[in-house]
């Protein structure tokens, strides 16, 4: 994805999450206040995908 678009979306999503109404909604619904920026989310997604691959192999499953 175009880095400029990624950054623009990141700024919009982050601003939305930190908005008082969003924070109020999250607190009222016991939602965690967690946000990962582009680099942190990419790292998380890669780690999670590798974990899932290992679990599929360990459990002798197929993802086909």
Image (tube, rainbow, N blue to C red):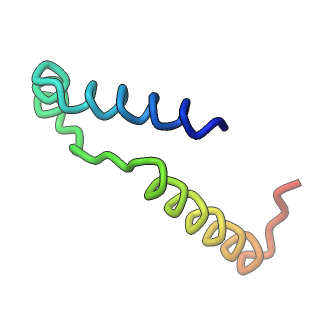
Q: Quadrant of the N terminus?
A: top right
The residue at 52%/63% (across/down) is 43
The residue at 19%/32% (across/down) is 18
Q: Is 59 above or below relative to 33?
A: below
Location of residue 42 (image quadrant) = bottom right
| 23 left or right of 16 in image | left
| 12 left or right of 33 in image | right
The residue at 89%/54% (across/down) is 64
Report the residue that reaches farthest toward the front: 4
Q: Is 51 above or below relative to 28?
A: below
Location of residue 27 (image quadrant) = top left
Image coordinates of residue 58 in percent, x first then y, are 72, 80
The residue at 55%/30% (across/down) is 5
Report the residue that reaches farthest toward the right: 64
Q: Is 60 above or below relative to 11?
A: below
| 61 left or right of 52 in image | right
Image coordinates of residue 6 in percent, x first then y, are 53, 36
Report the residue that reaches farthest toward the bottom: 58
Report the residue that reaches farthest toward the top: 21
Q: Nearer the viewer, residue 62 or 35?
A: 35
**How many numbered marks does the figure carry?**
0
Image coordinates of residue 8 in percent, x first then y, are 45, 29
| 27 left or right of 41 in image | left
Q: Nearer the viewer, residue 7 or 47?
A: 7
């Amino acid at each position: 994805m175009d880095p400029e678009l990624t950054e623009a979306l990141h700024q919009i999503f982050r601003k939305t999450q930190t908005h008082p109404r969003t924070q109020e909604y999250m607190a009222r619904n016991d939602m965690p206040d967690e946000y990962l920026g582009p680099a942190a989310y990419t790292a998380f997604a890669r780690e999670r995908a590798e974990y899932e691959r290992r679990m599929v192999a360990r459990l002798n499953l197929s993802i086909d």
